[in-house]
Amino acid sequence: MCEYCNKTEVTVAKLDSDEESECEWFSEQEAPGSCDQPAVFSVSEWYVEDHLCEVHKERTEQELEEGLADFLDRAGFGSQYEMRPIGQEETCDHISPAAIENWQPCGKRASHAKYILENWMLCAEHVAEMGYDIQEQ
């Protein structure tokens, strides 16, 4: 396990009373936006999404620079990312979308962890369902 895999960083903040947003809850069983409650918390979470070899790190950065990030943002999957060098032994998780018949990860030695920042606006029920303590809020 790389040095970043166990370092998920979560921030839960109560929204100001003048900030209005709908709950952005998403689950496998329900459609996104199915919660009709107003969001009262902002949740930000940094986590490792992938381990990448040098080739796939550069390819990922190039794709994001060429507009993939804008497309994902418009589709509701926007996030920020950082490529962080890793020192511990990991294998590259990248699976080429062109390899339709062989969905196998690259498997070469990974040199970087793709660290992602996701942000959600959620109601109190769904913040609690995600396991975050909001008692002190």
Image (tube, rainbow, N blue to C red):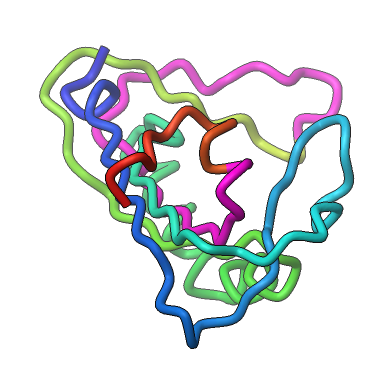
Does residue 92 show up magenta in the picture?
A: no
Of the pair 32 and 47, the residue shown nearer to us: 32
Judged left or right of residue 72, residue 5 is left
Q: Nearer the viewer, residue 64 or 47?
A: 47
Which image quadrant is residue 63 in? bottom right
Q: How many marks?
A: 0
The answer to which image quadrant residue 109 occupies is: top left
Q: How far across and down, in percent of the image, does residue 3 sit?
A: 16, 23
Residue lying at the far bottom of the rendered structure:
18
Q: Quadrant of the N terminus?
A: top left
Taking the spot 56% from the left edge, 75% from the top edge, the residue there is 66
Q: Quadrant of residue 50?
A: top left
What residue is drawn where x is 30% and y is 16%?
90
Which residue extends farthest left? 87
84 in relation to 68, above or below? above
> Is residue 25 depicted above or below 103 in this figure?
below
Name the residue rendered at 60%, 64% in the picture. Answer: 39
Q: Is residue 117 left or right of residue 113?
A: right
Q: Is residue 24 above or below residue 131?
A: below
Identify the magenta region. 99-126
Q: Residue at x 59, y 31 (%)?
A: 129
Looking at the picture, how far across and down is residue 91, in whole percent? 37, 17
- Percent x, y of residue 32: 81, 52
Percent across and percent down for residue 120 are: 54, 58
Q: Does residue 100 appear to the left or right of 111 in the view shown?
A: right
Along the line of sight, the residue nearer the viewer: 70 or 133: 133
